[in-house]
Image: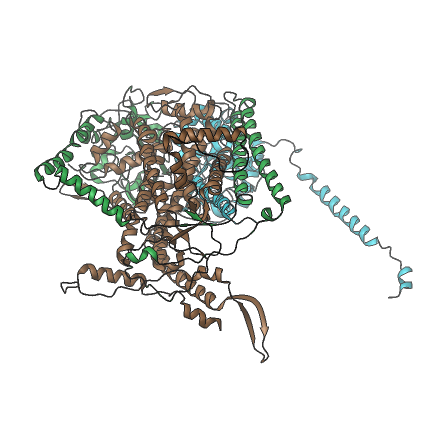
Chain colours: A green, B cyan, C brown
Amino acid sequence: MATTPAGKSLSVVAPQEDFDPGIAVVSTMSPQNPGLPPEHLRVTDLDPKEEKKAERLIALFFILSIVGSVFAAVAYVSFPIVSGDMQSVRNNNLFVGLGITVSLLGVGIGAVHWAKSLMHGHELVEERHPTKGTDEERKTAVEVFSQANKESGFTRRSLVRNTLIGAFLAAPIPAVVLFRDLAPAADPIAKMKETLWAEGVRLARDPSGAPIKASEVTIGSVFHIIPEGLAELEHHRLEEKAKAAVLVMRLPLDALNELPERASWSYQGIVAYSKICTHVGCPVALYEQQTHHLLCPCHQSQFDVTNHCEVIFGPAARPLPQLPLTVDAEGYLVAQSDFTEPVGPSFWEREL
Amino acid sequence: MSLSSRRSGRRHPLAGALLLVIGLFVTGGAYAATSAGIAYAESPPISQAQLVDDGEKLFLANCASCHGLNAEGTVAGPSLIGVGALSVNFQVGTGRMPMAASGPQAEVKPVQFTQPQIDAMGAWVQTLAPGPDLPDPRYYEGDGDVAVGAELFRINCAMCHNVAGAGGALTEGKYAPHLRDLQPVHVYGAMVTGPQNMPVFSDMNLTPKEKNDVITYLKYLDETPSVGGFSLGSLGPVSEGLFVWLIGLGGLIAVAIWLTARSN
Amino acid sequence: MSTTVENQTTTPQGPGMRFTSKAANYVDERTSASTAVKALGRKIFPDHWSFMLGEVALYSFIVILISGTFLTLFYDPSMTEVEYEGSYLPLRGIEMSVAYHTSLDLSFDVRGGLLMRQVHHWAALLFIAAIGLHMLRVFFTGAFRKPRELNWIVGFVLFVLAMAEGFTGYSLPDDLLSGNGLRIIDGMIKAFPVVGVWMSYLFFGDEFPGTVVIQRLYVLHIMLLPAILIATLAIHMVLLVVNKHTQFAGPGRTNDNVVGSPVLPVFAAKAGGFFFLVFGVIMLIASLFTINPIWNYGPYDPSPVSAGTQPDWYIGFADGALRLVPPGWEFVLLGYTWSMNILAPTIVLIVFLVLVAAYPFIEAWVTGDKREHHIADRPRNAPVRTAIGAAGVTLYAVMWAAASSDLVATHFKLTIEGVITTLQVLLILGPIAAFMITKRTCLALQRKDREIALHGYESGRIVRLPGGEYVEVHEQLDDYERWRLLDFEEYKPLTVRPNPNGKITAGTRVRAGLSRWFFEDRVMPVEAKELEGAKH
């Protein structure tokens, strides 16, 4: 319960005596609390003219709020959105928003000013009680529980109790099982190890799906590639794209340091690498024409295209997988096979 | 000096001012008279040969120290043989060249040459070896398909330049600059020539019509007001987060301090 | 026989008051409302601006609920692909999910739609920022001590729930930016040993991105998480009322009382007014500043990406942690791939969060202090706790800064490699340096307080004494001001003693070692006799 202060001296010790202070240094020689400071009167308490002025100011804010609310409603109608006209969208949102802002701030400022300048300004004191219940209440609580225990025999009847606990532990098991059909019946691990690329699949432009001839790839250029046929897929288009997206670049032959076993994977300096970062799967799309570096914008992993896209900086752990390339009879770039390793981020069963 | 000698002096008090004004007129007039011969707008049209010749002279005076007397390149600058007039139009027209200081990449600076001078240098470079020339203006008109342009932009450009053309970081201190308020011919030129580490987007990669679509999208970004309000640089969650902590929370803390302060 | 509430005042009842007393009586006869009014109506709440940070969070949450409800009337989370037919020209004819389409419609074709979207998103950013600052305030003032340890855990749960709400929320428009964020989360999930690929497969309902994840995030975002959050918030508020709020030391304030304003009318007016102010400030920001311009990003597609891809700020520390890992942290053991480049930062984050949650219990164990604490500490009076907090903040800040490494590089003309390498070093050295500097600063401030309490503050008046000496006059504080500098407690390190069995356990040794680390450097509070002595 609140009590008025009026310079009453206050004791400090009370409930703390019940508890161990640990390594606290409890001093008996601490200075005394001087009690509440004298009350500070505001101009609105002393001068009735100031009080009236404050009242009028508060009322003004509330009136401003009403104006704001009305303005917002009027703005909603008078600043219509003309389809395709971005300025009209802007105006509508701006003026409705400003109207509501004034409406809200008016109430807020008025209410706070009312509390600060007109409402009773004195500080009041409320006593705390120890958080734990009184000894009486605690004793009753203990009695309630021991009575309940006696009547049910919970602690005594161990067979009943233990089988109940067993039942509670087993109850969530169906819930775990019910989650299986969140995804179709298939082996996700097998799916991660294959993409749409296969022998003879043409490389096509993203997003149009038009195939690319080797002669169209000039030195210093980069092409964003999808397998031919992906653009027309009815189902699973994005899922396949998330594995099959590829970058094609052409480097000067003397700049490429190919691995001997991959010498046949490029075509006259044209190389193709998976676009899916081996870190956590963002598209590694930034190609630097002169340094021949690929940069992933998400976490700044860098891959060196001259050295089979090995990681030269950043948190990626593995080089980007290379797509073996060749050309078909008409000069279009085609894949020789699928990737020889899973694309994208690593996972537990990757090497299996 | 006595008052009497002052009053009887030969010089008028305003003589100094008048002398200054006469002097200004004389020097200004002399300058105007002699420079009348270098007024470009009124000069008669020059032949292609003259253009190439002027270009070579400008090149030798301003570029040869880094690019070599025959543009064959030196240790300070690459060869320009085969880069074409379009490269010159882009590099010099955006102020990147002449490069002020060596660094990870050439920065945009105030343009040092007039357009006729740039055209002249470009014409000369074009004679060195076949290279990309200035495109047909209808391909950078900006009247293409904005939706196609936006999609191409997102796939080919946004990863370096940001979806709204706000620019982005590359490795080792390089960066892809912002794309706001650029001249369409420079955008076209950059796509074709692949300046520094920007890849080359030849006409077999992005057709001229597609390049026009991309330019149309950039034009749309420049001309369309930001619908939600001030765009905070279009840099995304980083600037939004900074703003909410400094202005949003900071402002509300100021309000809370006012609210809990003792009223007078 | 029931009795009506008699009006005790002498003023005659107008029609308004008669209606109010009849209504109050009606309600009371059915709900015992008067009991609640008696218990809570004049409850005292202390007044300090730093106590209002929790209110900022609470009110932002209410704004989120209101604006979010509006959004649900227009948004559709389906991932079915459709062609855009709305009014934003650069996306006309583009294939996109219904979720993205309806988000665009909200922004461009619904009056006030964009406003509400922006209110919702700005409020969400503010909500979590306020929670963070509120947690820091509670930490640095020791307000997590008994009896509030459990409420600290409740608050921590709220913090995690708020981040989850934010993440699920900004992924709903299915745009390129948030879609890449989901891609990153998917990559992280897949890296988990044994169950990673399966968790990803079941969560996305297929290979990434699948056709159901946005709908599932929607259910989490508008139903499950808000329900848990609101219930947890209710517990948080109940505990706050039961424990009563802490207060800073001051004249008239003791550990056994609360000094401040009563709920009715002052605190209600201020708190209610503050709600309108918070709402108003959010509305002002949402009217003037763009947030999350989804139309620029385009629909999610696994192939394009934007330079400057970052999550919302509160996920930044996780993204930054990923960026700070050096290359090549992965190995294959017995045929299984251990992606330490994902697992290591994840473990660091989890350990960090667990330490944050467990801190009250750690400190309570070290001090062995089982008393209730209702006086909020000044941070300087708990130097090692404050220094630990500073070190934690520094660790969080370094990870958070790493998330914007590319933007830092472009804006300050640095290399991304240089920025990341510097932050990698700061990740280790920063918290250590912050700890040392903060601890020393706190001790120095305590000594300064001591000086001022005993000898007064320097007034700036220089006086020349008769002997020729110049001295600066020190003004004594008045009793009320000085009390604020005197009212704190210190702790002494534990003396190691054998337990009843005669053994010194490892636990005791650890506890003694920690208490030494905490309290060997200390400044004792001023004692009464020192004050007497100084007055002469």
Task: Tell me if residue A276 can be seen.
Answer: yes
In percent of width and height, residue C216 lies at 29, 28
In percent of width and height, residue C207 lies at 25, 28
In percent of width and height, residue A298 lies at 35, 39
Residue A343 figure quarter: top left
Residue A180 or residue C48, whichever sits in front = C48
* Whether residue B255 is situated above or below residue C288 in the rendered picture: below
Residue A306 figure quarter: top left
Residue C90 figure quarter: top left
Quadrant location of the N terminus of chain B in the rendered image: bottom right
In percent of width and height, residue B92 lies at 52, 39
Which residue reaches farthest bottom?
C467
Which residue reaches farthest front?
C1
Task: Tell me if residue B196 can be seen.
Answer: no
* Whether residue A29 is situated above or below residue A47 in the rendered picture: below
Residue C32 or residue B24, whichever sits in front = C32
Count of residue discs = 0
